[in-house]
């Protein structure tokens, strides 16, 4: 994005694969539009032969202490707050974190997700970082929203790699699963808003399964609100070897 600021508008117009409620996180909403201006060197675009954006990665730099304990249970929300806080207070970043990877619907299944990860790792090295993190959204978890995230993350295939495809892509590139961040995104709303986002009637209080959600949504008819609390998984790509070889 630092090289192609003319593509900012086209980047925002890229089709979203996420269910509508995923775009309503108030914390992310405060910062998302500022990413290409505040951290242009961390926003990567994949273009086809016609200069059309077919994939993108958003990431942010931040000052990491070097400890796993320094990774917040609030995942994505906390990482966005932290990156902008560090920038405002002139704190020198020491690592980078993924915040979103997206492939255009008509270009899925072509290995672009894996190439996006490789490009993000290379870009982090180029920026002088030895560590790349990410509060990662396990791509297949929405198929079983009532399975505890800790149990889901522990599942592996016979070859030892994670059963979840997106976690597996990271681990194949050398990432380490650090821990679950149980409060990575919090999306509150009135029942009217949630009905608009999901098309559901939501006439009964309780934990309701919503298409695309990793865990059930908490619905309170009595108090006229619903809240989605999404868990993600902290992953850590150690890039020191790549940095040395570069």
Image: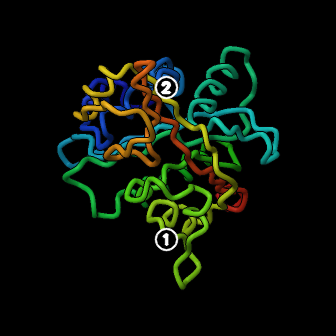
- 121 sits to left or right of 26: right
Which label sits on residue 28? 2
Vertical comparison of 136 with 245: above or below: above
Q: Secondary structure at mark 2?
A: helix
Q: Residue furthest bottom?
A: 158
Which label sits on residue 172? none
Decide: few, some or many residues near mark 1? Use Cα within 10 Å; few <14, some 14-19, many ≥20: some
Q: Contact, CB < 8 Å: mark 1 with mark 2?
A: no
Q: Which residue is mark 1?
A: 163
Between 60 and 6, the one nearer to me in the picture: 60
Q: Secondary structure at mark 1?
A: loop
Q: What residue is drawn where x is 45% and y is 18%?
A: 223
Between 240 and 245, the one nearer to me in the picture: 240
Q: Measuring from the top left, give residue 65's x and y in whole percent.
A: 82, 38
Q: Measuring from the top left, give residue 75's x and y in whole percent.
A: 61, 38
Q: What residue is drawn where x is 29% and y is 43%?
A: 17
Decide: few, some or many residues near mark 2? Use Cα within 10 Å; few <14, some 14-19, many ≥20: many
Q: Measuring from the top left, give residue 76's x and y in whole percent.
A: 56, 36
Quadrant of the rendering where the N terminus is positioned: top left
Vertical comparison of 158 with 51: above or below: below
Vertical comparison of 138 with 41: above or below: below
Quadrant of the rendering where the C terminus is positioned: bottom right
């Amino acid at each position: 994005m630092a090289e192609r600021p003319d593509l900012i508008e086209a980047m925002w117009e890229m089709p979203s694969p996420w269910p509508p409620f995923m775009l309503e996180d108030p914390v992310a909403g405060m910062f998302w539009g500022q990413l290409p201006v505040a951290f242009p060197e961390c926003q990567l675009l994949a273009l086809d032969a016609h200069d059309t954006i077919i994939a993108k990665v958003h990431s942010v730099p931040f000052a990491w202490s070097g400890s796993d304990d320094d990774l917040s249970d609030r995942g994505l929300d906390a990482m966005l707050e932290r990156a902008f806080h560090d920038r405002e207070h002139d704190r020198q970043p020491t690592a980078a974190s993924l915040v979103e990877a997206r492939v255009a619907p008509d270009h899925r299944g072509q290995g672009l997700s894996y190439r996006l990860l490789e490009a993000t790792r290379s870009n982090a090295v180029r920026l002088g970082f030895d560590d790349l993190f990410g509060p990662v959204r396990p791509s297949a978890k929405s198929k079983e929203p009532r399975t505890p995230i800790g149990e889901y993350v522990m599942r592996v295939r016979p070859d030892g790699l994670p059963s979840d495809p997106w976690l597996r892509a990271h681990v194949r590139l050398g990432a380490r699963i650090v821990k679950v961040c149980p409060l990575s995104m919090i999306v509150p709303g009135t029942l009217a808003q949630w009905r608009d986002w999901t098309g559901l009637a939501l006439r009964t209080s309780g934990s309701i399964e919503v298409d695309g959600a990793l865990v059930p949504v908490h619905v309170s008819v009595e108090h006229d609100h619903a809240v989605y609390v999404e868990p993600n998984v902290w992953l850590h790509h150690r890039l020191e070897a790549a940095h040395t070889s570069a």
